[in-house]
Image (cartoon, grey):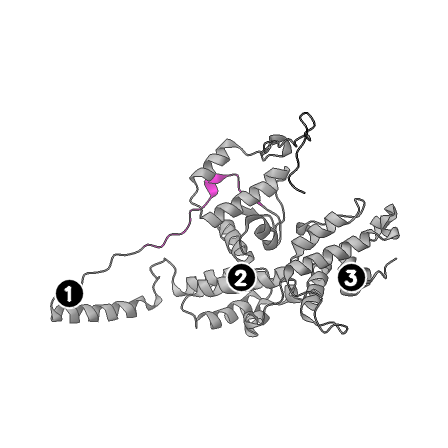
Amino acid sequence: MSNLAYLPGHEPDQERREAPRGPQLEDGFTRIANELLDALCRADFTAREFRVVHFVIRQTYGWNDKAKRMSSTFIAGGTGLHESDCSKVLNELIRRRVIIRHGGSRSPVSLNKHSGEWMPAETRKRTPPTTCPESGQDALAQSGQDALAKKDRKDTPNPDGLGTVQSHRAAFQIFYDAGLPKKNRQKAEAAFAKHARKRPDPIAFAEKLAANIAFRLEAGELGFDKLHPTTYLNQQRWEDELPEHCPHAAIFEAWNAEMPAHIEKVSPEDWTPDSHGFQALANAWQNFKTKPRASTGKPVFTEEAEGVAFYREVFRRLAQVDRIRREDAARWCRLSWAVKQGETVKIFKGEVA
């Protein structure tokens, strides 16, 4: 019965609804110098660049850190951008000296606080169209001049300021810095030039390869982090089928939430694509999602949300094991062990005691 009458003075107490508390400084804040904040207000960033810059500030200054290792997956989770876009934007900001990378391709990054060193975005100069000659003779002369000028421009810089050779070199550098081991540069550059010559825009071709490489590294494709650039080009690996994307960050979060406090927590920055645990998780995810089980004829899961829920349940069951609850379990109980496919299956079936 939903309609009830109460005697005067015997009405049930009404729950008080408090107004939303809103953000509070005591819940956390990010310190940044006013001079640097003013420089950010004047910077000619795109919307995506602003999102990545603010995320870098949040993850460094927000935690009183000078620099932090950030993968494309990690940045994508905090900005809402696609992983391949994060890789492109971050590389562009590094090129412009807005973001500084302290080391190799997977080293920590930070905001360059010396805003005077920031480079402006490259703009393409557009020349106004020339007027069409009125007379046929003028048109013929103009046509001959255009043909001669086109021939003369064969080895001269293009309107963007990069000649053919310079453009290929700039494009190759984008590819070479994408994350594969930097080995046999001369052979790699020759192999890149062979493919780039067939494309109208070498820069766009290099960015396509860089995005492909970034995705495969983030996905933890087996052995890909050891692949030489020349081999990647000669085998045209960018045309291979992409591996299943493994949401490492979401699985890390499930591990940290479900496991007891004395078990080591995991940060996305600690699990780089070249680590054994990263690749073990990626391979297990691929198999669970694509290979059918003998008992049911279907994969363990087919959607990303189902997969994350599966791993969360695995970690929940592991946390209930008596041996895991003991303090000494911290010496051996690691996520890198639990995500090995065979161990994950044992945990789920209750065979770990």
Give amino acid for label 3: Thr
Query: Is residue 123 covered in magenta?
Result: yes
Q: Quadrant of the N terminus?
A: top right
> Where are the magenta residues, as a range?
110-125
Is residue 220 left or right of 336 when viewed as pictured?
left
Which residue position is annotated with label 2?
211
Residue located at (20% from left, 70% from top): 143
User: Tag 2: Cα neighbours inside 10 Å, few (<14), some, or many (≥20)?
Assistant: many
Q: Is residue 245 above or below residue 37?
A: below
Specify the principal SS of the magenta part: loop
User: Which disc, if any, is residue 344?
Assistant: 3
In-front residue for pair 103/13:
13
The residue mark sitting in front, 2 or 3, is: 3
The residue mark sitting in front, 2 or 1, is: 2
Give amino acid for label 2: Ala
Name the image quarter holding residue 281: bottom right
Which residue position is annotated with label 1?
133
User: Tag 1: Cα neighbours inside 10 Å, few (<14), some, or many (≥20)?
Assistant: few
In-front residue for pair 204/295:
295
Name the image quarter holding residue 178: bottom right
Give amino acid for label 1: Pro
